[in-house]
Image (cartoon, grey):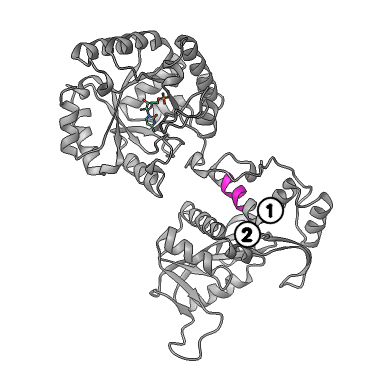
Amino acid sequence: MSTLCEKTRNGALKRNLLRQMLEANVFKFGEFQLKSGQISPIYIDLRECFGHPNLLMLISEALSKLVTISGAEYTGVLGVPYAALPYASVAAGQFLKKPLLIVRKEAKSYGTKKLIEGLYEPGDRLILIEDVVTTGGSILDVVKVLTAEGLVASDVFCILDREQGGKQKLLDAGVTLHSLLDMNSVLTFLYSTGAVSDEQWHGIVKALNLNYTAPVKVDIDKEIEDLSRLPFVENQRTPLSERESLTENALNKKILSVMRKKKSNLCLAIDYTTSEEVLQLAEIAGPFVMAIKVHADAITDFSEEFTRKLTTLANDMDFIIFEDRKFGDTGNTNLLQLKGAQKIASWADVVTVHAVQGTDSIAGVFRQLINDPNYRLSGVLLIAQLSTKGSLTALDGYTESTVSIAEENRDVISGFIAQTRVSGFSDLLNWTPGVNLDAKTDSAGQQWRGVDEAIDVQQNDIIIVGRGVTSSSEPVQQLKRYRRIAWEALAKDDESVN
Ligand SMILES: O=c1ccn([C@@H]2O[C@H](COP(=O)(O)O)[C@@H](O)[C@H]2O)c(=O)[nH]1
């Protein structure tokens, strides 16, 4: 499958880039003489992107992601002159937060007469940013200058690899080329959108001596895709049985076992306001759900009797009790609230916690109670992404920082409240609210989407459904419907549960 079709951030990022490039007139058709002397029927002019701030940002961000994913170690970012300099500047300053260096094509005849400008020490390791790579010659020239100054450069990140031998030539010289796009993806995109005909495709491939056999048409929409709706991690979900045996988190072992036994990845959010209503629906829902979520502070007659009955139901019907308090204070206050009037730590299996308060207010405090056998509380779900429109959890870096806290404290943090799969650690579970099969919004900030999008596209594990069930006159039918659709979507790629 072409990477252009991937239902991942990476795939969507490439599609968005190409869509915007096409609109920005980057692809020109006619007869062009290339630097090598070759006559080409296509000219890819990435300098056109400078005139479109969004595109400049998108490319720089995508290059920065490529750098991060590669795991390359470096102290500075060097732009290969001249066309790559804007991307290198934005990537270094805005996204990678590393010093920018530039190399001159010829030394100045006055002043410092330096060839390399910027902050560096001999022995420093740099990454190179380039726009288009054809033969790799310009990069090797730059590497020569850097090596003479005692600098190390073994990774180059480019926007487009024209696949005309550059990658291998660089590799032979000890330099790894990482590219956002290659010529094959570009031609597939242009052919699929109709910008290039069958005849043109063959003409380009022949003129550039490319080793491609036949054009491939893929399904490409015109619309720019919203990257925030796609998983943060590219790898596929691990089968549930494997996750159950791999995880050391006791709560997740239990959750995964309940899910497999009941064939359910449905958590019901019962946002009713009286104990009787909550308990009545919990009893009806018990056989179909793996968890029941409540907001204890919304229950007007909340009492110890209520929690006693709820825990009895949970024990008898094998579901997890989830109190959605969203703790977000100092560690000390969190502790007081967990043990306070509603004694949450005594009856809830899992609670939600905001990451905004920082690791020290979360991990230690919750660990204390989770490890104390006097309390039922066994885990924490960190809020990585809220489902509400305009949520500040979408601010740059918020979700990533939340994920880091969770990944470092997997004994207490059992997973996330999120919209898309956010971590590659298979023992962390992704619970997702904002699911409704019959409505899109409640006009009070909530945003709903369907089960397939939540489980299949966005790779969540568990759906949290509230009004899709609680507002229905036929809750049992709805419970069966959500449970079936969500389980089928999860089990589709998981032989261990079929
Ligand atoms: O981002 C979030 C976090 C929590 N919720 C909670 O989930 C349920 C959803 O109920 P619906 O009726 O399906 O909207 C509700 O209890 C919220 O407090 C969320 O929706 N989004």
Q: Residue at x 54, y 76 (%)?
A: 144
**Element at label 2:** strand
| N-term-proximal mark, 2 vs 1 | 2
- The image quadrant where one finds the N terminus is top right
Q: Find out whether the residues at labels 2 and 1 contact each other: C-beta distance under 8 Å.
A: yes
Quarter-of-image position of residue 93: bottom left
Q: Residue at x 79, y 47 (%)?
A: 214
Tell me: is circle 2 under 8 Å from ligand 1: no
Query: What kind of secondary structure does the magenta stretch mostly adopt?
Result: helix
Q: Amino acid at mark 1?
A: Val
Residue 53, given in percent of the width and then of the height, sits at 54, 60
**Element at label 1:** helix
Residue 5, given in percent of the width and then of the height, sits at 64, 41
On screen, 473 above or below 108?
Answer: above
Query: Any magenta on residue 222?
Result: no
Q: Residue at x 40, y 23 (%)?
A: 256
For residue 199, the mark is none
On screen, 190 above or below 228?
Answer: below
Which image quadrant shows ligand 1? top left
Q: Residue furthest right?
A: 199
| Disc 2: CA contacts within 10 A as few (<14), some (14-19) or many (>=20) | many
Q: Amino acid at mark 2?
A: Leu
- The answer, for residue 154, to whether it is visible in the render is no
Query: Any magenta on residue 12?
Result: yes
On screen, 110 above or below 436?
Answer: below
Residue 249, given in percent of the width and then of the height, sits at 32, 29
Residue range of the region highlighted in magenta in the rendering:
11-17
For residue 160, the mark is 2
* Residue, disc 1: 186
- The image quadrant where one finds the C terminus is top right
Residue 350, given in percent of the width and then of the height, sits at 29, 26
Q: Label 2 vs label 1: CA separation?
A: 9 Å
